Image (cartoon, rainbow, N blue to C red):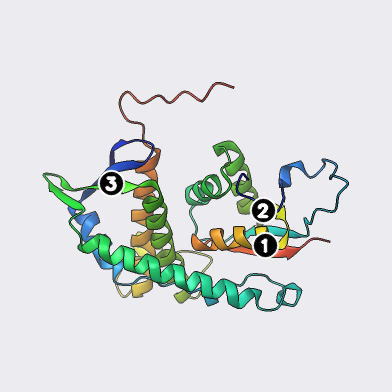
Amino acid sequence: MADSASPVVDPDETTKEKPAESHDFGWSVVVWNDPVNFMEFVTHVFMNVFRWPKPKAEKHMLEVHEKGRSVVAQAGFEKAEHYVHLLQGYSLHATLEKVG
Amino acid sequence: MKLLHRNDETLGVQWSHTEKRLLDALAETYPLHQPEEQPLSREPSDLPDGAESWLHAARSEELNQNRAWLGDLVRSDRFQPSEQGWRQELTHPEVETLLQILNNIRVGAWARLGCPEILPTLADLLKGGADRNAWLMKLAGELQIGLLLALDATLDGEDTAPPAE
């Protein structure tokens, strides 16, 4: 993210080797399934919050729907909390989870 | 709801008379979903001290700002009467705020129903005796979907081709 003060790991690119310096990716942003949020709405929110293209937003939305949860970002605490704040602003069920 | 036009900054939408009355009524109920109903983590002991309360305070402030904005919106002259209902200009951030408000009402009403796994259908509601929150959840959802469909609409002459790689 251009405005990011702390780094963010794309959860789809977790196989990439992390840089040698000690970046903090210690928190996951998790979005949980519920029966009330429309699938179209969840996709829209992912596109807007993460600036994802629609196919990627739909992939994570379907992961939430089918697997019950999706990790949508990994980052340091402040950045991860910021994302939870934005997602909860849309009343999505989003929480922080410590990695490892 | 119908998309009339859009550019990089704003979009114009057409509300039917029914949709406008519905928005006016729903605005009276906002906010329904409170920050305290949204935990920052399922393992609060992992969080730094004060993180949860800071988030709740920030979200409460946002809800207050959204409520003030919504009150101004429904009382303002930003709805222009037309033959089919009402025309309105919204900035893109305002559209996002409106979507947040509608889903706050929908999810808050669902929470007050006890977070049912099976949502009541329109047929259930029309049988009579339904909880007010079941109606709020349904009607906020109808406006939300209407707005999302309007956003997704393609206007005549609009280029729908994906950007070149």
- Report the side of A12 relative to A1 (left or right): right
- The amino acid sitting under disc 1 is Glu
- State the SS at label 1: helix
Q: CA distance from mark 3 to mark 2?
A: 39 Å
Residue for point 36% across, 26% down = B158
Q: Is residue A76 shown left or right of residue A22?
A: left
Tag nearer the camera, 1 or 2: 2
Q: How crowded is the residue under tag 2: few (<14 C-alpha within 10 Å), some, or many (20+)? A: few
In the rendered structure, find residue B1 and report the number of the disc placed on it.
3
The CA span between labels 3 and 1 is 38 Å
Q: Is residue A64 above or below residue B116?
A: above
Residue highlighted by disc 1: A78
SS type, badge 3? loop
Residue B12 locus on image (x, y percent): 27, 42
Q: Residue at x 58, y 37 (%)?
A: A55
User: What residue is disc 2 on?
Assistant: A5
Q: Secondary structure at mark 2?
A: loop
Q: Residue at x 40, y 24 (%)?
A: B159
Residue B140: x percent and y percent? 36, 61
Whole-percent x, y for residue B44 in the image: 70, 76
Disc 1 vs disc 2: Cβ atoms closer than 8 Å? yes
